[in-house]
Image (cartoon, rainbow, N blue to C red):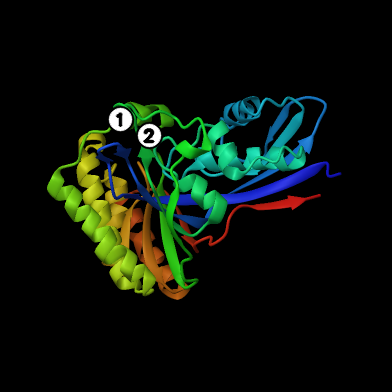
Amino acid sequence: MHSKVIVESSARLHLGFYNIISKNVAYGSLGVAISEPRVVVSILKSKETAMVNNTSIKQLEKTVLKTINMLKLNKVKVIVEKSIPRHVGLGSTTQLMLSIGYGISSLYKLNYSIRELAARLKRGTVSGIGIATFEKGGFVIDSGRIVSGKIVKPPTKVEELPQIIYRKSIPKNWFFTVIIPKGVRGLTEREEKEILSIPEPMDRNLERELRETVLMHLLPSLARADIEEFGKALTKVQILVGTYFAKYQGGIFCCEETEYAINSMLRHGAYGAGQSSWGPTAYGIVLGLRRAKDVLRKVKKDMERKGYEAEYYIVNVRNKGAKIIYS
């Protein structure tokens, strides 16, 4: 009988949508699991509920206790060893909640599947990318949500979650340069809900161009491992989706820091670049570690010249699901 489990997962980049609202289907997301930043949580049996935050990220206690309560368990200790920055577009809440839930289910032999946990924890209201990347890693496209009426409500059962309609591992020599501007944050889940719970239709020409880009360029180039064509298609998807969301975020991208970082990455050799979710995280896609280091060095120099502070990462794609260690 194990008395402790450790669960490791990591951030995801939300690469945009291929659909906003069509008949009774809302949204439909593209995304990818990245190797950093990571979530590492230890789950221990305990006589009472307890939580320890060993990270520098504040205000995690509310999310941890909410997860425990939603699983109707009160004798567990959760130690958060590593976590993902909050409200920067990297899916921190879903990864933390699923990591805790997966650990609790495994430790107490509750036998919940990852998707059963996601439904219980009310994940996947808009995007299923965080669930899918926790489950399988890699590059993922989800099915969107079936909507009855006009309001997109949180899923209550597995069947209501966005399903994986495409998943592929990414070549190991494809790297993402990730830049997280400091002093800027994306929307909280509550703020996002106010905008996305009743989706407004996309301009038909924009929608047609978006789907054509995904179907005719993005997916075929990924199948051929053609990073240059993939990067071009990804950048175009970002611009088209950003054009739709400009009315909510004040422009194609969330802020001047993110827009500057994206343009700098493209200027210095990234094949494609964009904003993850509501930002401010920006990313570029580059072939080879040496090239990634060169691009990031030049972008960092540009950012510092403008007086923008940021965190910088060079990451691989995580091509597998979350990891659990028993001890």
Q: Return the mark for residue 187.
A: 2
Q: Residue furthest right?
A: 1
Q: Which amino acid does the dot numbered 1 rest on?
A: Ile
Residue drawn 56% across and 51% down?
Answer: 135
Q: Position of residue 237 (x, y in %)?
A: 26, 55
Q: Tell me whether the residue at label 1 lies in contact with that at label 2, contact meaning CB atoms closer than 8 angstroms.
A: yes
Q: Residues within 10 Å of mark 2 (few under 14, many from 20)?
A: some
Q: Foreground: 275 or 310?
A: 275
Q: Is residue 206 depicted above or below 183 in this figure?
A: below
User: Above or below — where is 303 with respect to 279?
Assistant: below
Per the model, the C-alpha gap separating discs 1 and 2 is 10 Å
In the picture, residue 304 is in which quadrant? bottom left
Q: Is residue 125 left or right of residue 60?
A: left
- Few, some or many residues within 10 Å of mark 1 (<14, 14–19, 20+): few
**Disc 1 marks which residue?**
195
**Which quadrant of the figure contains the N terminus?**
top right
Residue type at the position of mark 2? Leu
1 or 2: mark nearer the eye? 1
Looking at this view, is 251 or 168 the one in front?
A: 168
